[in-house]
Amino acid sequence: MCVFFILSHTIYMYTKSTNSYKKPTKAIPIFLFVGFLYLLIFVVMILSINTGFFGNIFGGALPIPNHILQEEGVLQWDSFRGLDGYCVNIVGDRKIVVDNSFMILNSLNKGQQYTATVQTIKDGKFSRKSHTYEFVYDDPVSSAQELSTPVVKLEQSTILSWQAVSNALSYGIFCNNVEIAQTQKTTYNVASHLGKKCQFAVKALSSSLDFRHSGFSNTLEIG
């Protein structure tokens, strides 16, 4: 609104000082130019609302992943800096991950079509959902070698820690047998999931056709 007011006032003062309103041949180009500026500002505002473009540059609206792919049971999308994580929505099931990939552990049927969306997360705030990505679930080969099972220990009261598992792409974090997150690191802070008794466990995950997910690690009860 401020931009519209400033432009209008500027044009008004210019036409008044030059008497352009008394000279149609001069006034018409001016008002055409003003109309073009208004239209340009309107288009920019619409693009900003729909894409979060200016929010991404100036720190306003959170970025929205636009390129989502699924291969061998793994969803991947755009990576952004300075975020706390991503929220993956598959068949109404929401999962929080810290990296720009997600190993699908849902009971999906191989060869069947599903939909997924991704949101970015920063300071507890969620971006708008990405476009709806349709994919045919491609389950990794079930006869592949199982990854080694992680051995989990507790550090600083709320941090799960384990040794890296060879050939693992990432790790699934579970609370009472329900997956709550995935990470490519070998630590995970469960402080945000406390408030009730929870038995935490970890699985090593792989997207390779030569390996499949490990079994559950030992469980640690916190809460």
Image (spheres, rainbow, N blue to C red):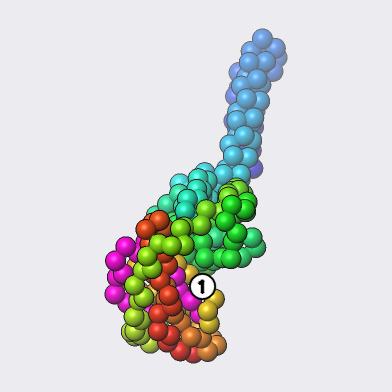
Q: Nearer the viewer, residue 14 or 101?
A: 101
Compared to 219, does 123 lie above or below? above
Inspect the magenta stretch and tell me whether residue 162 lies in it.
yes
- Near mark 1 (Cα within 10 A), the count class, few <14, some 14-19 or many ≥20, is some
Q: Nearer the viewer, residue 135 or 51?
A: 135
Q: Residue 98: x, y in percent?
A: 43, 64
Inspect the magenta stretch and tell me whether residue 173 lies in it.
yes
**Observer able to see residue 196:** yes
For the magenta stretch, what is the residue range? Answer: 159-175
Residue appearing at x 32%, y 62% in the figure: 167
Residue appearing at x 55%, y 88% in the figure: 196
**Observer able to see residue 184:** no
Q: Residue 18: x, y in percent?
A: 60, 18
Residue appearing at x 60%, y 24% in the figure: 14
Q: Secondary structure at mark 1?
A: strand
Q: Quadrant of residue 217?
A: bottom left
Number of marks present in the image shown: 1
Q: Is residue 162 left or right of residue 176?
A: left
- From the image, tell me which residue sits under label 1: 180
Q: Residue 221: x, y in percent?
A: 46, 89
Q: Residue 204: x, y in percent?
A: 39, 69
